[in-house]
Amino acid sequence: MKLNLAAPAAAAATLLVAALAGCSTGSTSATDAGAEPTTTTSVDADAFPVTIEHALGETTIESEPTRVFALGYAEGDYPLSLGVVPVGADKIEYAGNENFSSDWFDEALAEIDGAEQPERFSTADGVPVDEIVKLQPDLVTATQSGITQEEYDKLTEAGIPVVAYPNAPYNTTWQESLEMVGQALGRSALAEEVKAETEQAIADTAAEYPQLEGKTFTFAGPNADPSSFYVYTSMDNRPRLLVELGMENSPLVEERSEPGQFLFNVSAERTEQLDADVFLTYATSEDNVEELADDPLFQQIPAVADNRWYATVDVTEAVGFSAPSPLSLPTALERYIPKVAAAVDGDGSTP
């Protein structure tokens, strides 16, 4: 059955999910002190002490943190967008650059005189608690992470305040992360400014592509096991951002989405259920796009048959929309959305 030819796309999607769930490879050792903290902004008046509630507990921060560790794939973007350079952060290998960082993080970092790259840590085997403790942070932000209760407890027992995700792992919106990190750093006013600027960029993009308004979409693709397709729920950041641009989840996604889950599976024999005004997925290469376009099961999706579909090949483009932040979203909006709009118009990925 020809669906097996689409397995590379499934592998890419699986790798992307794993990467965004904090799974990278390799390791980085911390020094005792690490990089010197760099800050370009000031705290709000009467910002501290502040208490922040989250899914794993309640955290009180008594004074301005100066050594911030950012735990989570895109977590480092949030303090940096507020003028605070983290001393430690996740090691980014999937779609990362030679610094195990992202290009948008490095561009923002380069604008700060004297700023150094944070030490990068692998989370392939869970949160590296001992290495984080050695770095001597006075705050760990983990709003975009999958930190467990046990890992959280170990860090707090070591005297390090930790701000975890508000509801469930990997389900935090970029707005929630920005607000929570802003509170933790005593920069809520600046966080509101950054939020407004980012939301304006989203609004401007929506205005540039009015054909998106009211159009339904399904973001899905074949699993490594070709007997089923993964489908992103309305709680995943990809659909959330498309909704912010005026689009709507397909009826199937609205019906099957459950709190705390970012995907569900659909039998390959029922691919016609994945139809919408536009169908979005991933591919590993242009050759893989052709394989998907020729696959009989993909062709059962009317949007694919009508060339109202788009398969992302550029991993940087994919990550920019999958792990959104005030730093990554401008790139994602510029690179990804024009192609979604073209697919809505019937000029999709079919060669």
Image: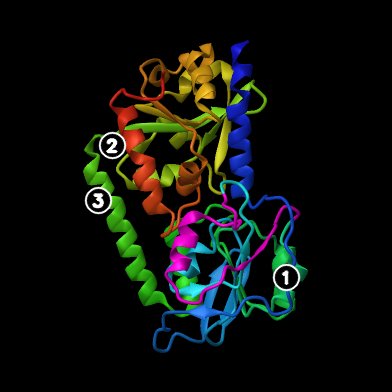
Inspect the image, locate mark 2, and give the three-letter code of the amino acid beneath it: Leu
Q: Which mark is residue 30?
A: 1
Q: Nearer the viewer, mark 3 or mark 1?
A: 1
Q: Element type at marker 1?
A: loop
Q: Which of 153 and 202 is in front in this view?
A: 202
Q: Is there any visible trace of residue 171 in the rendered image?
A: yes
Q: Residue 204 carries which label?
A: 3
53 sits left or right of 212 in the view: right
Q: How far is the residue under mark 2 from the one under mark 1?
A: 46 Å
Residue at point 40% right, 26% down?
309
- Upstream in the sequence, badge 2 or badge 3? 3
Residue at point 43% right, 59% down?
327
Q: What stretch is highlighted in magenta?
A: 96-125
Q: Element type at marker 2?
A: helix
Q: Which mark is residue 83?
A: none
Count the marks: how many? 3
Q: In which quarter of the image is the N terminus?
A: top right
Instruction: Determine the main secondary structure of the stretch shown in magenta.
Output: loop
Q: Which mark is residue 212?
A: 2
